[in-house]
Image (cartoon, rainbow, N blue to C red):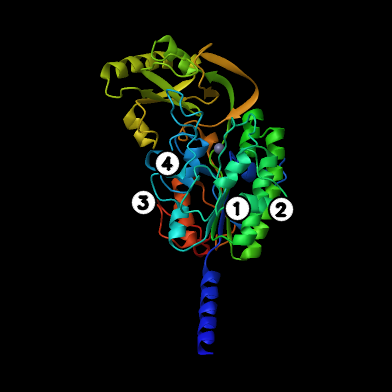
Amino acid sequence: MRRLLLSFAALLYAASLSAQKPHVLMISIDGMRPDYVTQADKHGLHIPTLRSFLVDGTYADGVVGVFPTVTYPSHTTLVTGVWPSEHGIANNQRFDPERVMADAWYWYAEQIKVPTLWSLAHAAGLRTASVGWPVTVDSKGIDVLIPEYWRGKLGETNNPDDRFLMNAISRPANEVAAIAARIGVPYMEGNETTIEGDEIKTRYSLEILKADKPNFMTIHLSSLDEEEHLHGPFSAEANEDLEKLDGMVARLIAQQRANDPKAVVIVVSDHGFADIDHAFNLGVAFVKAGLMSGAAKGGPWQAQPWPLGCMYAIMLKDPTDAALRQKVKALLDGLAADPANGIEAVMDPAQVAAAGGPAEAAYVVTLRKGFTATGMTTGELVIPVPGHRGTHGFDPRTTPEMRASFFVLGGGAAKGRDLGVIDMRQIAPAVSQLLGVKNIAPTQSLLPLGDSSAR
Ligand SMILES: [Zn+2]
């Protein structure tokens, strides 16, 4: 009897402990500029859930993002609080001068050089989960995991075998197959950057929220970015997509609140978007100068540009070759002198380091708004981009259209507070504070989220 009483007390104690544990859900809407929400009327947008954050929560007018403003480095800064030069995820795609990596992206958590919010939360005894977040394959800190990964060419054909692959790399063992059997909806074949793909990720996330009640969960929804690339930001297609995403966010909030009425929901994005009308194909100039072969399958090279959104990291095969470095600099300066090429700046390693950009680059060439970088090595140096297209990847310090989003609801976040413009590195420390775990990036100034200092 006494043993029974004791175990009952232990059970009560455990229950009270788990009741005190926080529940934080962070949803990333890829490519969502903050003015989709803060200026929703101007764009005729019906997004009641996202707009409710402006009244009931705390938000930023804009988040100055990472250098370059592209998806994988940005998502990694959101969960680490440091620039790409520190966390190691320099770009979406890997630098692959000899073309041996089959279009590999920075998919693997092992490539992140610093602690993440998941690893800190997990170490503190909190339950963690993630669906579709970049750079999470085999992340040791995530208890329930469906990472972002694919084998087919992104945006082209799906690979039916990816379903087996996604189940194999999900966590706990067979998580994807178990949810598929429960809800009768198969997981994506590869990475579907469509609203249908986001609906599948939402369905799987709702199942995980219901079954696991994670203390910290991240979700990445990617269709808005795709519509903005194809049709431009604030196009009818992008606006319609965001209106549908608003409904998915509503369902996720409802489930999160059913788990814990005091739960926190954060909506973020990785970067903004801007219209483009030209592509500057720097590889063409490198081939012409005899610095690389330009062959699709690689080939001999001394120096080549690595496209990072709307900038290029210039990579040298032998970084100690001073003559090569000088030859490349002369080529870049010559190209920058012609405004028709759209070059904004040719940055040396010290300037790149100050921006938090890739340390491995001999130079970085940033482009002016309107111009995008490509991997092309044949044809014209500058070509027009037809139709209404958009992209991201500019220098976050010179291009305000690249600003990302930050909206918080619950957890004592002040109602209707506008934080102004913040730095993307401030978000992870704010989340670590909400989770009650060790401050992930203690050198960052903390965001004033609480009610105590409400205006
Ligand atoms: Zn993105």
Residue tagged by mark 4? Answer: 111
Q: Quadrant of ligand 1?
A: top right
**Disc 4 packing (10 Å; few <14; some 14–19; many ≥20):** some
For marks 1 and 3, the one nearer the N-term is: 1
| Front one among 277 and 321 | 321
Mark on residue 443? Answer: 3
For marks 3 and 2, the one nearer the N-term is: 2
For marks 3 and 4, the one nearer the N-term is: 4
Q: Nearer the viewer, mark 4 or mark 1?
A: 1
Q: Is mark 2 within 8 Å of ligand 1?
A: no
At x 44%, y 61%, the residue is 437
Vertical relation: 332 (above or below) 446 = above
> Residue 397: x, y in percent?
45, 35
Compute the Cα span from label 3 to label 2. 44 Å
Provide the secondary structure element on which disc 3 rests.
Answer: loop
Mark on residue 139? Answer: none
Vertical relation: 263 (above or below) 153 = below
> Residue 200: x, y in percent?
68, 46
- Residue type at mark 4: give it: Gln
Residue 34 in view here: no
- Residue type at mark 1: give it: Glu
Residue tagged by mark 1? Answer: 175
Provide the secondary structure element on which disc 1 rests.
Answer: helix
Is 199 left or right of 369, judged from the image as shown? Answer: right
Q: Nearer the viewer, mark 3 or mark 4?
A: 4
Is 196 left or right of 75, judged from the image as shown? Answer: right
Residue tagged by mark 2? Answer: 183
For marks 2 and 4, the one nearer the N-term is: 4
**Disc 1 packing (10 Å; few <14; some 14–19; many ≥20):** many
**Disc 2 packing (10 Å; few <14; some 14–19; many ≥20):** few
Given contact means CB atoms under 8 Å apart, are the residues at marks 4 and 1 in contact?
A: no
Given contact means CB atoms under 8 Å apart, are the residues at marks 3 and 4 in contact?
A: no
